[in-house]
Amino acid sequence: MQRIVCRYRREAALGALGQQELRRCFVEALDAAGVSVSESRRGMLFSAPLPPGASSEAERLVLELAAPCDPHELRARVNVHLPAGLHVEGVWLASPGTLDETPGELDEAVYDVGWAGAPSADELLRQVRAFLLASDITFTRVREKKTQVLNARALVQAIQFLAGRDGLARLLITVSVGPQGTLRPEEVLSVLGCAPASGVAHVHRVALQSSRWRHPAAPTHIGAARWHRA
């Protein structure tokens, strides 16, 4: 079987598309393009779901094809049939034994988050520093009458302060994703104690990465504008 990795872009205008709806979009596009996918459970593998309302340029899909196909030809044929706001940006043959074949091991997501009504830069830096120096911070999530209690500190791996002026702020936030749980960027802001007063301007996923391949363990570093939990 030929395995092909697709990196695709997803725009916020596409709306809150669930994983089943996303799968349907790709199945229909592949069928229309005349590309056959293996019927095995590894026929179509997606990376971690994107939070509702977020955009991304880093989404990952691995296809196990029933018959060989040139990756670049596949990209051109499939893009014609995908809905507006969904577009395959890059394709390549999966390398056996690497992350190419196991998108589930991409267990960290990096978000560029911007919002209005933010506190001053000094106050924001103080709140982020206090959060990352803590060992345990409880976050209670209530969705559709289901309650979850999470250790928010364990789920946030890094925070980088990008910009802040005139009530506008941007943070680069790295969170764990997958079976161990995750926090949405808006939930991270809430836990920091600096939930946006005027609303989130944008949430954009810029990367998916693996904690195993990131770097060796090291003490948490506190710098002028970047903090990282190893």
Image: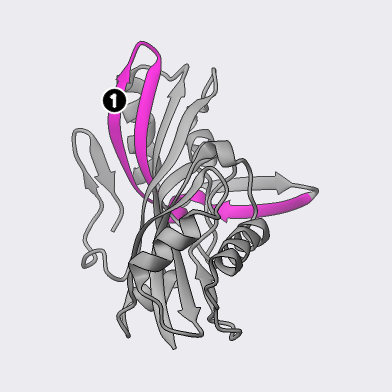
Q: Position of residue 209 (x, y in %)?
A: 34, 61
Q: Position of residue 127 (x, y in %)?
A: 39, 31
Q: Is residue 202 left or right of residue 122?
A: right
Q: Looking at the image, which residue sits at the far bottom?
A: 1
Give above or below for 166 relative to 70. Answer: above
Q: Looking at the image, which residue sits at the far right?
A: 145
Q: Position of residue 225 (x, y in %)?
A: 23, 34
Q: Which residue: 71% across, 46% down?
A: 142
Whether residue 191 appears in magenta in the rendering, the answer is no
Give above or below for 65 relative to 189. Answer: below
Q: Looking at the image, which residue sits at the far top?
A: 166
Residue 64 in sight here: yes
In this view of the protein, which residue sits in the foreground, 1 or 215? 1
In this view of the protein, which residue sits in the foreground, 55 or 85? 85
Colour pattern: one colour
In this view of the protein, which residue sits in the foreground, 155 or 75? 75
Q: Which residue: 53% across, 34% down?
A: 190
Residue 177 in sight here: no
**In which quadrant of the rendered image does the N terminus lie?**
bottom left
Q: Residues within 10 Å of mark 1 (few under 14, many from 20)?
A: few
State the extent of the magenta-drawn residues as a range: 146-174
Q: Which residue: 49% across, 41% down?
A: 11
The residue at which mark 1 appears reads as: 163
